């Protein structure tokens, strides 16, 4: 006989976000983005196209950048999700944020949280990426404002800074 506490409640998901488990109401069709933004008030991940094109909703799922608007919340219950809010203490993220600010790598800023999550993942697996690697890693993150040149420069600057500090790995 199944213990009552192990029976999933209808309309409730357990998500593991930024190191904490949270039970929230979610319909079967609710996306991870809906749960993050509308239930947990974690609004760094942006709802841009809401159909998997722009990358503004990018979060880290089990260490991999994913589009939260394409993931059903019910399918993410065993995953470790990190949003930008949960990555602020990471040295890679701090270096990226400083470089984005000093380089002027954003204008409206709507794409920036997703860019940062994708760029952090790149720097974690490749501490010294060339321009091609950066453009490839960020190819799923669209920016309507900057033309990408300063974004690439910011990621290169963050990489240099982390390498200089010995914090790249
Ligand atoms: S909002 Fe998810 S890819 Fe655009
Ligand atoms: S800074 Fe506006 S979309 Fe990228």
Image (cartoon, rainbow, N blue to C red):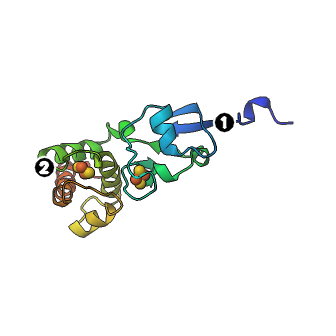
Res 103 label: 2
Q: Nearer the viewer, mark 1 or mark 2?
A: 1
Q: Nearer the viewer, residue 139 or 128?
A: 139
Residue 18 position, x and y percent, is 45, 37
Q: Is residue 90 visible?
A: yes
Q: Residue at x 16, y 43 (%)?
A: 101
Q: Which residue was labeled with disc 1?
A: 11
Q: Residue at x 13, y 49 (%)?
A: 103
Residue 84 position, x and y percent, is 36, 41
- Kindly indicate whether the residue at mark 2 contacts the one at mark 1 (C-beta within 8 angstroms): no
Q: Is residue 18 visible?
A: no
Dot 2 falls on a residue whose secondary structure is helix
Dot 1 falls on a residue whose secondary structure is loop
Q: Nearer the viewer, residue 120 or 148?
A: 148
- Marks 1 and 2, how far apart at CA: 45 Å
The tally of labels here is: 2
């Amino acid at each position: 006989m199944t213990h009552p506490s192990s029976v999933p409640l209808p309309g409730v998901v357990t998500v593991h976000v930024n190191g904490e488990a949270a039970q929230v109401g979610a319909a079967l069709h609710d996306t991870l983005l809906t749960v993050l933004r509308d239930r947990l008030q974690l609004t760094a991940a942006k709802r841009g196209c809401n159909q998997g094109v722009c990358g503004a909703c990018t979060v880290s799922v089990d260490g991999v950048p994913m589009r939260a608007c394409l993931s059903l919340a019910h399918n993410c219950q065993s995953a470790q999700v990190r949003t930008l809010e949960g990555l602020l203490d990471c040295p890679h993220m701090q270096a990226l944020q400083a470089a984005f600010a000093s380089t002027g790598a954003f204008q409206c800023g709507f794409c920036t949280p997703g860019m940062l999550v994708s760029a952090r993942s790149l720097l974690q697996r490749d501490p010294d990426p060339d321009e091609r690697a950066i453009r490839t890693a960020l190819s799923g993150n669209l920016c309507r404002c900057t033309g990408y040149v300063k974004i690439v420069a910011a990621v290169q600057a963050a990489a240099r800074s982390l390498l200089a500090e010995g914090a790249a790995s």
